[in-house]
Amino acid sequence: MSNSTARRTSMELRAMSAWDMAMPDWLQALARACDASGLRKIAAQLGVSPTLVSLVLNNKYHAPTTHLEASVRATLLQEGHVDCPVLGSISAEQCRLEQQMPFCSTSPLRVQLYRACNRPCTHKMEA
């Protein structure tokens, strides 16, 4: 093992230290995913910046993290299904992706999805 590898601490260990061993399950999943695949790759998969992921894992992000938590639960923990008014039962991850889509009038379905995702919805992920 090289010196640089020996000095590197896993994201999970750093997060556990920063959160005083009482970190939520979704943060532990995020830290493990970052250790396995890399922080930048996981941040891109979640649709957030690597800086946000790092700050949250190091317990230095002082704004609400509900959006990140929802993304982690939907993407990494693959929790739950959502009853979409347009598509029916879909994964929480697909719901999150549909909410991020810009308006597109190429088909009636895309228009319906845009309208449904941009009205008050119990599944709306906060930005």
Image: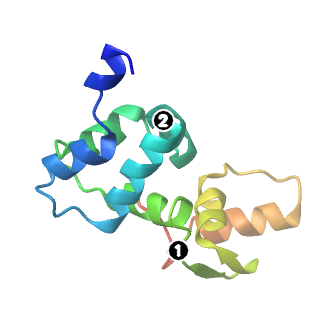
Q: Position of residue 48 (x, y in %)?
A: 45, 41
User: Which of 93/99 is in front?
Assistant: 93
State whether residue 126 is above or below residue 43: below
Q: How is the image coloured?
A: rainbow
On the image, numbered disc 2 is attached to which residue?
38
On the image, numbered disc 1 is attached to which residue?
79
Q: Earlier in the sequence, mark 1 or mark 2?
A: 2
**Label 1 – label 2 distance at C-alpha:** 22 Å
State whether residue 60 is above or below residue 87: above
Question: Of tags 1 and 2, which is closer to the observer?
Answer: 2
Q: Is residue 75 rendered to the left or right of residue 59? A: right
Q: Quadrant of residue 93?
A: bottom right
Q: Position of residue 51 (x, y in %)?
A: 34, 32
| Residue that lies at the very extreme toward the front in this rendered image | 1
| Residue that lies at the very extreme toward the right in this rendered image | 107
Task: Give the residue type at disc 1.
Answer: Glu
Q: Is residue 4 rendered to the left or right of residue 107? A: left
Q: Is residue 16 rendered to the left or right of residue 125? A: left
State whether residue 21 is above or below residue 122: above
Mark 2 surroundings: few (<14), some (14-19) or many (≥20) residues within 10 A:
some
- Residue at 66% from the left image edge and 64% from the top image edge: 94
- Residue at 62% from the left image edge and 67% from the top image edge: 95
- Please say if the residues under marks 1 and 2 sit with CB atoms less than 8 Å apart: no
